[in-house]
Image (cartoon, rainbow, N blue to C red):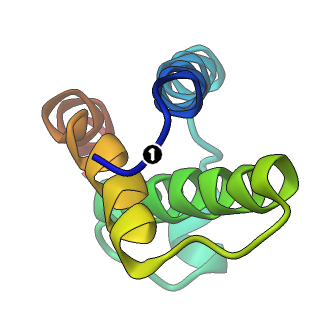
Amino acid sequence: MTLDSEFSKQTTELILQTLELYKTAGASPRIGDTWNCSNVGDFLCGFFVGEMVGSALSAFQIVHKREPTADEHLEIIELVESHSKEIKEFFAKFN
């Protein structure tokens, strides 16, 4: 692992806390029409994953004052993927 443990811990907390916010807020009934998608859950899942990876990459840049290496970038993606079961189960409810 190349990411420091504190950054990994904070990123994991961000993922879990944001997922809980999504669970509380639900989804707009206009998503399917606005974005012209038939599988709203799949769309939201992809949006969530992109949001988490993007937020973690931005946080990495702020904390470390540099771009992540390819290995660090992959580890950030893996942190999100480690919660894929819970993420997929929640967003599947919107399909």
Which residue is pictured at 51% across the width and 63% down the height? 47
Q: Please tell me which residue lies in front, 69 or 44.
A: 69
Amino acid at the residue labelled 1: Leu
Q: Please tell me which residue lies in front, 12 or 45.
A: 12
Q: Which residue is labeled 1 in the image?
A: 3
Q: Is residue 86 above or below residue 50?
A: above
Q: Please tell me which residue lies in front, 66 or 20.
A: 66
Lateral position of residue 25 relative to residue 62, left or right = left
Label 1 CA crowd tier, 10 Å (few <14, some 14–19, many 20+): some
Which residue is pictured at 52% across the width and 59% down the height? 53
List x then y, in percent, for residue 26.
56, 29
List x then y, in percent, for residue 23.
50, 20
Secondary-structure class at tag 1: loop
Q: Is residue 94 above or below residue 43?
A: above
Which residue is pictured at 45% across the width and 45% down the height? 3
List x then y, in percent, for residue 12.
46, 26
Which residue is pictured at 69% across the width and 76% down the height? 67
Q: Is residue 29 above or below residue 47?
A: above
Q: Please tell me which residue lies in front, 22 or 63.
A: 63
- Residue 38 occupies quadrant: bottom left
Lateral position of residue 49 relative to residue 62, left or right = left
Q: Is residue 41 above or below residue 18?
A: below
- Residue 51 occupies quadrant: bottom right
